[in-house]
Image: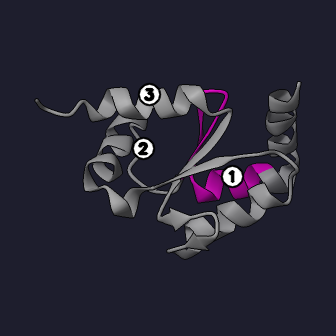
Amino acid sequence: MSRDVQSEIKQVVESNAVVLFMKGNRDFPQCGFSARVVEILNSFEVPFGTVDVLSDPEVRQGIKVFSNWPTLPQLYVNAEFIGGCDIVTEMHLNGQLDSVLKAVEA
């Protein structure tokens, strides 16, 4: 039986209010970009899940197809693709990320 990676990713995105597809995990990021997004998310008091794409090459490639976005990490909030490290950092600096994450708590 072949694996439906897109359905698996969709399930993860829809079942977690905030989820970060990243290299490594929140306790041990495996790249600077992933570490930066984890640091930003940790500055908010909102729970978030992580998916280590290094442990599953099919998910690593599949998430890029799912979002139509070529790079990692990728942040999803309320099943909506927010962006990668640059976008999340910019949103954090200009206050937009605060509004997006407050919608999770509501």
SS type, badge 3: helix
> Which comes before the other along the chain, label 3 or label 2?
3
Q: Is residue 67 left or right of residue 106?
A: left
Query: What's the amino acid at mark 2?
Result: Trp
Is 40 located above or below residue 7 in the figure? below
Q: Residues within 10 Å of mark 3 (few under 14, many from 20)?
A: few
Q: Is residue 42 above or below residue 99?
A: below
**Residue visible at 44% across and 27% down in the picture:** 10
Q: Is residue 103 left or right of residue 52?
A: right
Front-lying residue, 25 or 76: 25
Where the N terminus falls, by quadrant?
top left
Tell me the number on the disc at residue 25.
Answer: none
Which residue lies at the image location 79% right of the left edge and 60% below the top edge?
Answer: 42
- Numbered label attached to residue 69: 2
Query: Which of disc 1 and disc 2 is earlier in sequence?
Result: 2
Task: Determine whether the residue tagged by mark 2 lies in a helix, strand or loop.
Answer: loop
Secondary structure under tag 1 reads helix
Residue marked by disc 1:
88
Residue range corresponding to the magenta coloring:
74-91
**Vertical side of 10 occupied by 21: above or below:** below
Residue 85 magenta-highlighted: yes
Q: Which amino acid type is marked by label 3?
A: Lys
What mark, if any, has residue 10 been given in the picture? 3
Measure the alpha-carbon separation of dots 3 and 2. Answer: 15 Å
* Quarter of the figure with residue 53: bottom left
User: Residue 79's x, y, as percent?
Assistant: 59, 27
Q: Amino acid at mark 1?
A: Val
**Image quarter in which the C terminus is found:** top right
